[in-house]
Amino acid sequence: MPEAHVDPLPAIAILNGYQLVPVINSPDNIVMRDVVGNKNDTVVGNSAISLLRQIEGVGFATGVDSLKVLSDILDFIRTELTWKHQPAAIFNQVNPTQNQWYTVLNTTLNAKICSVRVEVAVANETIAARLTVDGVVHDGSTAATAGTAYYAVFSVDDDTMFISAGAASPVQNNLALECRNVKVEVRKTTNAGAGTLHSVVIYATR
């Protein structure tokens, strides 16, 4: 008995139907086309396209591509955690008034003080520096030789600050002084002459 002839066209038509693009945001979840979705699906759908669009940027304040946004956020965080070197704060006061504090640096930004230098152009003067660090005052003074650089240095024993001559000495015994806000002031406490009071603060901020 001859075999019955089966027309393959209906089966092909069904398969082709499964491959047709579904309507936008179709709620169906029966065949592969439902799972993949329509390229125009929005974030409210449940297809793979919708899920990708949800990942791409919904909930972010800027940008349309979430991977780029995440990269930008990571770059921003890295930048915020990295100290940014600032131009040195340089101060010169001709004929400074005895005992008057002069502000060299006054910042409310997160700061890292690397070096505080003070000098005077007249011999037989006493010079002083004062650092107000997060509300705590540190100061020190020294008899100065004209034109010699002196640096603010912190004692490792009791956190007191003093002024020392010689090679450049960053504060905190070669450890930068990190603070939320800092004010650096200098003065001379004697009045031997009208020589310029000079100060340089090397610092960085976030």
Image (tube, rainbow, N blue to C red):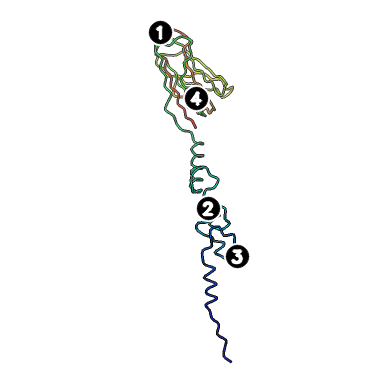
Dot 4 or dot 2, earlier in sequence: 2
CB within 8 Å, label 3 to label 4? no
User: Rounded to the nearest whole Å, what is the CA distance between mark 1 and mark 3?
Assistant: 94 Å
Near mark 4 (Cα within 10 A), the count class, few <14, some 14-19 or many ≥20, is few
Name the amino acid type tagged 3: Ile
* Outermost residue toward the front in this view: 23
Q: Nearer the viewer, residue 33 or 196?
A: 33
Q: Nearer the viewer, mark 4 or mark 2?
A: 2
> What amino acid type should be assigned to the residue bearing mark 2?
Arg
Q: Which residue is mark 4?
A: 107
Q: Which residue position is annotated with label 2?
A: 53
Q: Earlier in the sequence, mark 2 or mark 1?
A: 2
Crowd tier of the residue under label 2, counting other residues whose Cα lies within 10 Å: few below 14, some 14–19, many 20 or above: many
Q: Residue at x 51, y 66 (%)?
A: 20
Foreground tag (3 vs 4): 3
Name the mark nearer the viewer: 2 or 1.
2
For the residue labelled by badge 4, is the local secondary structure a helix, a strand or a loop? strand
Q: Earlier in the sequence, mark 3 or mark 4?
A: 3
Q: Which residue is mark 1?
A: 193
Residue 32, given in percent of the width and then of the height, sits at 56, 65
The amino acid type of the residue labelled 4 equals Thr
SS class of the residue under badge 1? loop
Residue linked to disc 3: 30
What's the CA distance linking mark 1 and mark 4?
Answer: 31 Å
10 Å crowding of disc 3: few (<14), some (14-19), many (20+): few
Image quarter hosting the N terminus: bottom right
